[in-house]
């Protein structure tokens, strides 16, 4: 019936517009009519069977798509302005500008006249991150990369104030089993419990904190309850006093044969979350140097040291107490932005490791839902050998107190007062310590 009514394209093209419209309508309606006849001729059982087959085919197609893995993307970060007024008690600030953007206690001058007040403003610690998550037949695979602009300024303050972007974090993660995962890339050292850092405006924080980001391979395994175990192999490096065979100078060396090894346990008891970390590392160097008799000697040595860290957060309703205690004979570069070195190269070329200890306690209090404050007290010290220079740092102390207003959860306006002290081994110009006082204002929006 349909074939008898079909028109060729040649015949249709020669007809008037009205005829062509009617013909088009016939072409459209007749197939629908034929389909309707087929559906009408179907029994109810046949129709149900056909629909069930269509649903089964769709389910198979959906599972095939899931097996291939759909990747989810997300990004975020924050914009942060810092404005700081600083004054040093025993000299002018470092000419290189180190310590202008955040507290670097090691550059506090000692033994000079009181320095002038300095004001600085910058937004270079703003950051952005990008993350992916993909469900696969072998588990969930993820990636994370984050950058900020906190170092390597390429423009001066007169015109551009430009800074080069830098990689903070870049790693992949693989949740290969429901209780176990692997991480490979650069991120915070497993030795450092970042979750215990206090809520302050300064970029790094108290002088006694651990602080280290580096490349690593990390295995994490969930235990019963909220506990877990971490094991990592991390990039090594050594920092030593005495590059000339005496206590003079300090240098970084990249002569390690083994990675730094970290074992960490995370636990929870009621409202107290905590971690206990152990660090085993090689401290090594190899170089030519001159001893005290000006003789050139080929020196090299390798020793092994350790570090221990206990960190925790105790929640008191909306408030909390945060703490960290660190000790060992090879904390060196892990403690307070390398405020102490790992050891000393003695005159005979051997390495003597330096015992050090550091920590802090912080209390955060919410005055109202939108107003909060933190008080942080911190200290660290090192048992340096007698051969080190008089100006070698022996201890540090710091205190932070702030007031932050958050009109919404993602927006903070805060002011913070910071006081820090540096004490050296022996007096210089009759003085063995120096201070810095800083008032900081910050505005931060997290997106």
Image (tube, grey):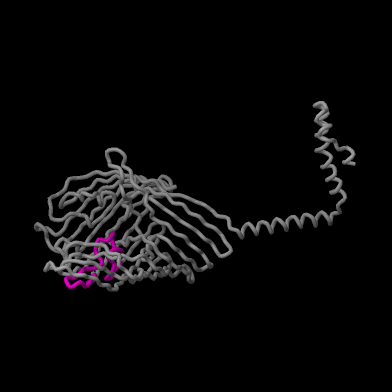
Q: Write the start and end of the magenta stretch as one range.
A: 326-353
Q: Position of residue 433 (x, y in %)?
A: 16, 58
Q: Residue furthest left?
A: 430
Judge whether 409 appears above or below 223 on screen: above
User: Can residue 1 be found in the magenta stretch?
Assistant: no
Q: Position of residue 357 (x, y in %)?
A: 26, 67
Identify the residue at horizontal 17%, vertical 55% (top origin). 434
Quadrant assignment, res 258: bottom left
Quadrant assignment, res 267: bottom left
Identify the residue at horizontal 52%, vertical 52% (top origin). 73
Q: Is residue 412 left or right of residue 65?
A: left
Q: Is residue 42 left or right of residue 59?
A: right
Q: Position of residue 412 (x, y in %)?
A: 38, 47
How many numbered marks, from 0 up?
A: 0
- Given residues 289 and 250, the one toward you in this image is 289
User: Can residue 328 be found in the magenta stretch?
Assistant: yes
Looking at the rendering, in which quadrant would you find the N terminus?
top right
Q: Position of residue 395 (x, y in %)?
A: 21, 63
- Given residues 22 and 428, the one toward you in this image is 22
Identify the residue at horizontal 47%, vertical 60% (top origin). 172
């Amino acid at each position: 019936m349909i074939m008898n009514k079909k028109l060729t394209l040649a015949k249709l093209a020669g007809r008037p517009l009205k005829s062509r419209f009617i013909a088009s309508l016939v072409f459209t309606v007749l197939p629908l009519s034929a389909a309707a006849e087929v559906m009408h001729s179907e029994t109810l059982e046949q129709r149900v069977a056909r629909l069930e087959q269509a649903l089964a085919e769709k389910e198979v197609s959906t599972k095939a798509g899931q097996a291939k893995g759909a990747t989810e993307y997300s990004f975020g970060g924050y914009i942060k302005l810092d404005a700081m007024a600083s004054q040093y008690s025993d000299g002018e600030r470092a000419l290189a500008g180190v310590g202008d953007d955040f507290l670097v206690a090691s550059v506090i001058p000692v033994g000079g006249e009181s320095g002038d007040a300095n004001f600085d403003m910058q937004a270079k610690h703003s950051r952005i991150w990008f993350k992916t998550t993909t469900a696969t037949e072998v588990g969930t695979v993820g990636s994370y990369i984050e950058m900020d602009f906190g170092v390597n300024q390429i423009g001066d303050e007169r015109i551009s104030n430009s800074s080069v972007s830098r990689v903070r974090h870049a790693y992949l993660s693989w949740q290969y089993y429901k209780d176990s995962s692997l991480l490979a890339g650069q991120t915070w050292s497993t030795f450092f419990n970042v979750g215990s850092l206090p809520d302050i405006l300064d970029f790094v924080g108290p002088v006694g904190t651990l602080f280290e980001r580096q490349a690593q391979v990390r295995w994490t395994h969930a235990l019963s309850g909220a506990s877990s175990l971490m094991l990592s192999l991390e990039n090594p490096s050594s920092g030593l006093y005495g590059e000339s065979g005496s206590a003079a100078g300090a240098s970084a060396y990249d002569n390690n044969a083994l990675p730094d090894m970290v074992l960490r346990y995370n636990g929870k008891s009621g409202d107290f979350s905590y971690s206990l970390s152990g660090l085993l590392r090689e401290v090594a160097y190899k170089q030519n140097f001159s001893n005290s008799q000006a003789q050139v000697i080929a020196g090299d040595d390798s020793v092994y040291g350790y570090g221990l860290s206990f960190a925790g957060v105790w929640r008191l309703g909306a408030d909390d107490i945060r703490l960290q205690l660190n000790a060992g004979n090879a904390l060196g570069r892990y403690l307070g932005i390398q405020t102490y070195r790992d050891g000393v190269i003695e005159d005979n070329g051997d390495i003597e490791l330096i015992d050090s200890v550091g920590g802090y306690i912080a209390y955060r209090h919410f005055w109202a839902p939108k107003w909060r404050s933190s008080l942080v007290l911190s200290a660290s010290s090192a048992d340096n050998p007698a051969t080190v220079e008089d100006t070698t740092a022996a201890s540090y102390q710091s205190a932070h107190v702030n007031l932050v207003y958050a009109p919404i959860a993602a927006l903070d306006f805060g002011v913070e007062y910071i006081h820090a002290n540096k004490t050296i081994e022996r007096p210089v110009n009759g003085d063995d310590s120096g201070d810095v006082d800083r008032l900081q204002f910050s505005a931060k929006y997290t997106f």
